[in-house]
Amino acid sequence: MKTFVSGKIHGIRVTDKSVDYNGSVGIDAALMERAGIEAYEQVHLVNLRNGERWVTYAIPAGPGEFTLNGGSARLGEVGDKCLAIAYRLSDRPFTAPVVFCDENNAIADTMQYHIQGGNLTGHNDWVVPVH
């Protein structure tokens, strides 16, 4: 078994931060659903502005919201563009949804990674846009 991406939200922007909250990251519930990320699922976050990477868990938030809570609040600023990535163990084929956000954290585009038997399929067919 290997660990592969199972869902990804790309380009989501920080809308708020709260050091005094009990940890986690609040993500627009519709984005979570579309990316296949469940409430309280572990996610890896990457801040594209400063390069910070950390692991926490996702909680559903309101439309357009992406809130860094607890210690995460020290790793980004409002407006920073980030990635939220969930992973899973597998040795079987599956698809992983990817959601691209616009500047308001609405869905701008989607695609899927196709994982085949523990490997991404060929160079040109590993991503399939979904419109």
Image (cartoon, helix red, strand yellow):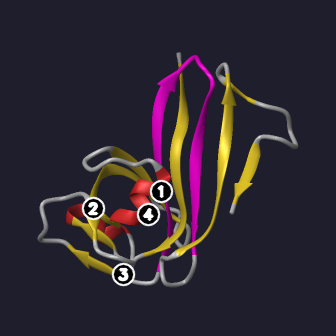
Q: Is residue 26 left or right of residue 93?
A: left
Q: At 41% from the left edge and 55% from the top edge, which residue is drawn?
A: 33
| SS assignment at label 3 | loop
- Residue mark closest to the camera, 2 vs 1: 1
How many numbered discs? Answer: 4
Q: Which mark is residue 15?
A: 3
Residue 126 in the image: above or below residue 27 = above
For the point 39% across and 80% down, the residue is 77
Q: Earlier in the sequence, mark 1 or mark 3?
A: 3
Q: Nearer the viewer, mark 1 or mark 3?
A: 1
Verify CB contact (< 8 Å) between mark 2 and mark 1. no
Q: Pointers 2 and 3 in contact (CB under 8 A)?
A: no
Residue at x 30%, y 50% (from the top left corner): 56
The picture places residue 103, in percent across and down from the top left corner, at 54, 83
Left or right? Give the position of 89 relative to 74: right
User: Label 2 sits on what residue type?
Assistant: Pro
Between marks 1 and 4, how big is the CA–CA gap?
5 Å
Q: Earlier in the sequence, mark 4 or mark 2?
A: 4
- Marks 4 and 2 sit apart, C-alpha to C-alpha, by 9 Å
Task: State the image coordinates of residue 41 (x, y, percent, origin top left).
Answer: 31, 44
Q: Quadrant of residue 100?
A: bottom right
* Residue type indicated by callout 1: Arg
**Disc 1 designates what residue?**
34
- Is 34 in front, or is 24? 34
Amino acid beneath label 3:
Thr
Distance from disc 2 to disc 3, alpha carbons, whole Å, reads 14 Å
Quote the CA–CA distance across marks 3 and 4: 14 Å
Please tell me how crowded label 1 is: few (under 14), some (14-19), or many (20+) other residues with Cα within 10 Å: some
CB-based contact (under 8 Å), mark 1 and mark 3: no
